[in-house]
Image: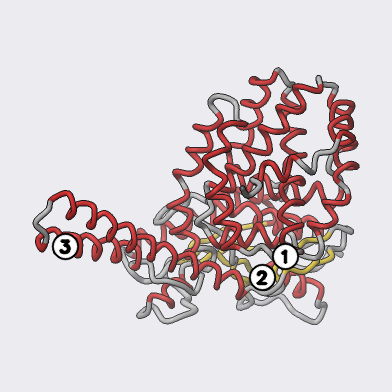
Amino acid sequence: MATSIMDSIQGLITPEIKQALVSRLGESPQAVQSGLGAATAATLGGLASKASDSGFLGQILGLLGGGTGQSLLSNLSSIAASGPSGSTAELVDRFLPMVFGSKQSQVGNAISQQYGLSSSSALGLLKMAAPLVLAFFGKMQSAGSLNASSLGSMLRAEMPSLGNYLPSGLASSLTGLASSTANRAATVVQSSADATRGTPRWLVPAAIVGALVLAWLVIRSMNSPKEAVQTAANVTTQAASGAANAVGNAATAAWAALGDMMRVKLPDGSDLNVPSRGVEARLVSYLNDSTAPVSDTTWFDFDRLLFDTGRATLQPASQEQLTNIAAILKAYPQVKIRLGGYTDNTGDPATNLRLSQERADNVMQELVKLGIDPARMSATGYGAENPIADNSTEEGRQKNRRISLRVTDKQAAA
């Protein structure tokens, strides 16, 4: 019988790691052991709730670039003894919001209440579970046995057993996370440039409609109602699954188009692990180029922002790129920016203009929450103005639905 992910990760937890956590957190050994198991299972459950989102899984694997997974594996004891620090702390602070979104505190509170841990200890165990999970996946990735597809399959297979490790109430919380997965999968092709070059938005509903029509024809052709119903259900499931796979493949291709992960050094001594052709790397290159002037025509399109379809609500997976942009702005305190929201030309122009403004405003507010002075930013919705692609094609319309950033000042005050 194959070893489960939970069993494999628990195998990484040595007696030294357990003792270090007990000493640092000041909690009982039993509470620490149970709480860490629950934190690990909750983290895997959060990942498993998005196991069909290939773009998200690509981001998770992207965090492990540059030997990060192996580094975590060799430093688990020191992380247990003193907590995540430096680049590990930055990694954990990016990873946990990607997994739990706004439910991170709810997960910590459930673990705290179930095992009699303080809130800070429960958070500490979540921040220990994160490097444990990432170290395990990094180990598999370095062995060449892990990609987005295999990771998704592993997480789906693991999901049914995770409830054995979770406190009451937390499993339902993770179910809530899972319920948003369909929206996330749909919006992953609509991110930042709403711009993944992928499956047209109509494919999933068209496939389902086509499946229902086909199911109706199957029912008409059969004498046995039971057989007809079963066959129709199979047809519908297979068609919908094929459409979902097409969306996932499109998202994977879009992530691959951003290039390999690379370390980008910032002037304040920090660094970012970002795609080589992503907006962060291009923005830093521009800011470092003293010969590149501020220009009304130099815009940088976000490439990993996700919104609810037709709404201005940012998806939790957007947090990673927003955090990176905030880090860049902090490292270049003289820089000022304008955020621009854009739509395609379909629908009511006034509605499009309002949506583009609301999305730009929400991105700005998220950056303010991350510590950026609002006086350094402005946000403007342009609706369908300034298209960068042909609105007569679905691919072009996807590119035109975007949030962009323009540097309005890059010089230090005299």
Q: Nearer the viewer, residue 266 or 29?
A: 29
- Determine the CA span between mark 1 and mark 2: 7 Å
Q: Are marks 1 and 2 in contact (CB under 8 Å)?
A: yes
Q: As drawn, which residue projects farthest toward the top?
A: 116
Residue sitting at x 81%, y 21%: 27
Residue 402, position as x, y percentages in the image = 51, 66
Front disc: 3 or 1: 3
Residues under numbered marks 3 and 1 in contact, where contact means CB atoms less than 8 Å apart = no
In terms of secondary structure, where does tag 2 sit?
loop
Task: Please name the residue that numbered disc 3 is placed on.
Answer: 218
Residue type pointed to by label 3: Val
Q: Amino acid at mark 1?
A: Val
- Report whether residue 282 is seen: no
Task: Kindly report which numbered mark, 3 or 2, lies closer to the viewer in this rendering.
Answer: 3
Q: Quadrant of the C terminus?
A: bottom right
Task: Tell me which label, 3 or 1, sits earlier in the chain.
Answer: 3
Q: Which residue is mark 1?
A: 274
Q: Is residue 237 above or below residue 383?
A: above
Residue flagged by tag 2: what amino acid is it? Gly
Give SS at disc 1: strand
Q: Which residue is mark 2?
A: 278
